[in-house]
Amino acid sequence: MADLIVRLYDLPSLAPAIDRIEQEKVEIRRALTPEKSIVVQWVAASFSSAWADECAVSFARQPLACFLALRQGQICGFVAYEATCRNFLGPIGVDDGSRGRGIGEALLLCALHAMRNEGYAYAIIGGAGPTEFFQKAAGAMLITDSEPGIYRGMLRE
């Protein structure tokens, strides 16, 4: 999977994405330190131990670099940034039953806006899976010759 780059100075507005998920009774907020174990365990159970490891790292910085999507107090999605590399966004995931409702887009834009507010002009989405999603939601562009990128030779389960 190739890497993508996003111009943070040219992001879509966050408000419409938040409005859409509020209609779904979903809220997005930055994670809190005492939630680390719960979040990391959810990510491992819902996605993979590798993503859980990256998510755990996002709790080691201030401000925390993890946003959660919550429905009725339960996690239904997450996004982390600055986990594997500085200025990298990801992983990002929404549980199967919540996909297709705009939650992923809202999570993505929350994290990208946070990165812009922290002083970055660009963000890298490393090893992006659904490139069309990132292109449509945030104007991400393919970085040529970036596959396999930073994840080259990574140990796998």
Image (cartoon, rainbow, N blue to C red):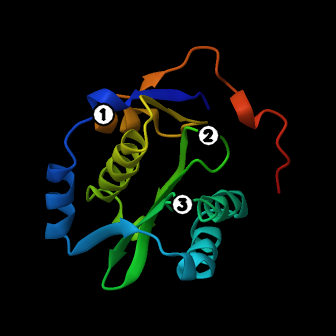
Q: CB under 8 Å between callouts 2 and 3?
A: no
Where is residue 80 shown, x and y percent of the image? 52, 55
Amino acid of disc 2: Arg
Residue at image point 43% right, 44% down: 118
Mark 2: secondary structure: loop
Mark 1: secondary structure: helix
Tell me the crowding category of disc 1: few under 14, some 14 to 19, or many 20 or more residues within 10 angstroms, Cα based. Answer: few
Of marks 1 and 3, the one in the foreground = 3
Q: Which residue is mark 2?
A: 86
Residues 57 and 2: in front is 57
Residues 7 and 24: in front is 7
Q: CA distance from mark 2 to mark 1?
A: 24 Å
Tell me the crowding category of disc 2: few under 14, some 14 to 19, or many 20 or more residues within 10 angstroms, Cα based. Answer: few
Where is residue 106 shown, x and y percent of the image? 30, 54
Tell me the crowding category of disc 3: few under 14, some 14 to 19, or many 20 or more residues within 10 angstroms, Cα based. Answer: few
Direction top: furthest residue = 144
Amino acid of disc 1: Lys
Q: Which of the 4 quarters of the picture holds residue 10?
A: top left
Of marks 2 and 3, the one in the foreground = 3
Of the image marks 2 and 3, the number of the one nearer the N terminus: 3
Of the image marks 1 and 3, the number of the one nearer the N terminus: 3
Where is residue 104 shown, x and y percent of the image? 36, 54
Of the image marks 2 and 1, the number of the one nearer the N terminus: 2
Q: Quadrant of the N terminus?
A: top right
Residue at image point 59% right, 36% down: 126
Q: CA distance from mark 2 to mark 3?
A: 13 Å
Q: Which residue is mark 3?
A: 62
Q: Which residue is mark 1?
A: 136
